[in-house]
Amino acid sequence: MKFSEADLEQIEKKGLTPKKVKQQIKIFKNGLPFTHLIAAATIGKGITKLTAEEEAAYIKVFEDKKNTSELLKFVPASGAATRMFKFLFQFQQDYDPETESLNSYINNTDAKDLSLFFLGLKKFPFYDEVMAKLLETYPDYNKKSRDEKAWLFVKAMLDEDMLDYGNYPKGLLPFHEYKNKVISTAFEEHLFETALYSSDNCKAKLHFTISEKYKDKFKSEFERIQQKVETKTGVKFEISFSYQKESTDTIAVTPKNKLFREEDGSLLFRPSGHGALIENLNDLEADVIFMKNIDNVVVYKYKEEVAKYKKVLAGILMELQEQAFAYLRKLDEDNLEEKDLKEIAKFLSKKMDVKISPEFKKYKSKYQIEYLQEKLNRPIRICGMVKNEGEPGGGPFWVKNEDGVISLQIVESAQINMKDKAQKSILTKSTHFNPVDIVCSVKDYKGEKFNLTKYVDPSAAFITEKTKNGRNLKALELPGLWNGSMANWNTVFVEVPLITFNPVKTVNDLLKAPHQVLNGH
């Protein structure tokens, strides 16, 4: 496949190389292997369930060490809110209040989500803002029929020349309403939550990955709320932002794996999904990094409970890391006895859920030391897992890679061969799923940063089908941030309660208890 001069210039401008683009095209042609599941990770078999005493002990570990560790919270926040309002966009497009009643439309289309939306209308935190916009735009709004009012309410929310919520970053939408009509965004809620755990000496650092076009909006929102949040929490906030790098974009191809060209003849590159953010994470310096999605927040009265489990996960990380570092220093001394090597192997197996090779016992001690060093000296992640109650999301599984190595992984359903009955059967035995509640360590025992891009499993990418201007295309998504991008990290799964997982995937999620307020801040 030959590139024109214009193609090569475009590729170089992206920060890519022709070799890398050809590798991506090869993936489209050859396809990607499905993940090979061995078993679902369950309590006692890959997922740890803690007692109240153990939780308290890990919180103490965290509290004792946090002031000597640099803490950071990493929040993927680049998404627009379009999918939150999907059913409302459909309603706005399909419904005509002059020819059909609202009740008839809801019954004929079985629109349960729309029915719930209008039933809970006054409970939404944006209700007053939308009403103000409606009365300003339509002074006779209150004289209109119920059907017209419903359609106009949605129009005021979504129209580009009105409030344009669908094209807003999700993190800056009204999420919660407190007493005296005080509105809080998800961005603001992250600050309040972070003050409860990710602060050392009354300073909290947060890093948000955002779309560059929203940077001014995020910065002005921080300026608006900074004094209020810092006064209420007694914590100073250090906020930073980064954007998905253009060099992580991937080439698009036609359904026949030919280069997809725009009308002007240029190549089409597309953002490659949240897996690209491993590059952003790789640029950050911290001892302990808390990771959580922008839309997974709660109103203030639930925050202490959420913060408690962040401290628990961080305490586990700190304790495991301290022991791992001690063993790595010991391995460097090169004067270990057989019992020492057995002790380290047992730690990896029992505490870090690392499957030790059956061949390990046959190795000479020199190779046992190298093996243990290689297994121990990796980034560590402690992942909260919640019981699966029908929510979509990746699940925890024991997986075998192409080299025959078995490890714990977070796997999305798209990575599983649903036509294989044995694989599908393992999927049905899954008891938990991943709420993206992760605490991780990205430095080695010498205090040097790991190069996180070396721990990615490139075969865990996705090929998806999309359209552009009515034309079908195939797109490549990089291995997900907490899936293939962290495939070769040391991974520990811990059960956490459902209260820690409250994402807002659809606007109606804002009606759930963790997003509704009875008392103010």
Image (tube, rainbow, N blue to C red):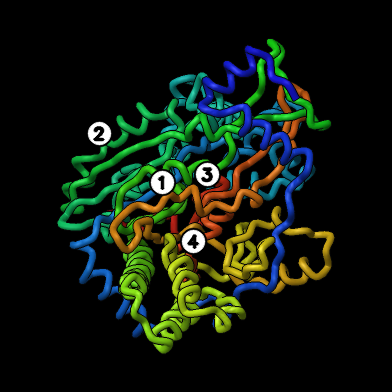
Q: Which mark is residue 489?
A: 4
Q: Nearer the viewer, residue 460 or 54?
A: 460
Q: From the viewer's perspective, is residue 465 above or below residue 16?
A: below
Mark 4 or mark 1: whose residue is earlier in sequence? 1
**Dot 2 or dot 4, earlier in sequence:** 2
Which residue is label 2 attached to? Answer: 223
Mark whose residue sits in front, 2 or 3? 2
In-image side of 14 versus 231 (left or right): right
Lateral position of residue 81 relative to residue 237, left or right: right
Give the residue pinned by disc 3.
121
**In terms of secondary structure, where does tag 2 sit?**
helix
The Cα–Cα distance between marks 2 and 4, rounded to whole angstroms, is 37 Å
Q: Amino acid at mark 2?
A: Glu
What whole-number distance in Å separates the C-alpha atoms at marks 3 and 1? Answer: 42 Å
Q: CA distance from mark 4 to mark 3?
A: 45 Å
Residue at 28%, 56% in the rendered image = 71
Of pointers 3 and 1, the one earlier in the residue sequence: 3
**Picture quadrant of residue 478:** top right
The structure residue drawn at horizontal position 59% and vertical position 76%, both measured from the top left corner, is 357
Q: Nearer the viewer, mark 2 or mark 4?
A: 4
Tell me the CA gap for discs 1 and 2: 27 Å
Kindly report the distance in space between the C-alpha atoms of the residues bearing marks 2 and 3: 30 Å
Report the quarter where the C terminus lies.
bottom left
Amino acid on which the number 3 mark rests in the picture = Leu
Vertically, is 140 above or below 208?
A: above
Residue 185 coordinates in the image, percent (x, y): 38, 42
Q: Which residue is mark 1?
A: 282
Pick whichever of labels 4 and 3 is earlier in the sequence: 3
First in sequence: mark 2 vs mark 3: 3
- Residue 231 seen anywhere in this rendered image of the structure: yes
In the rendering, at what x and y percent does residue 274 appear? 54, 44
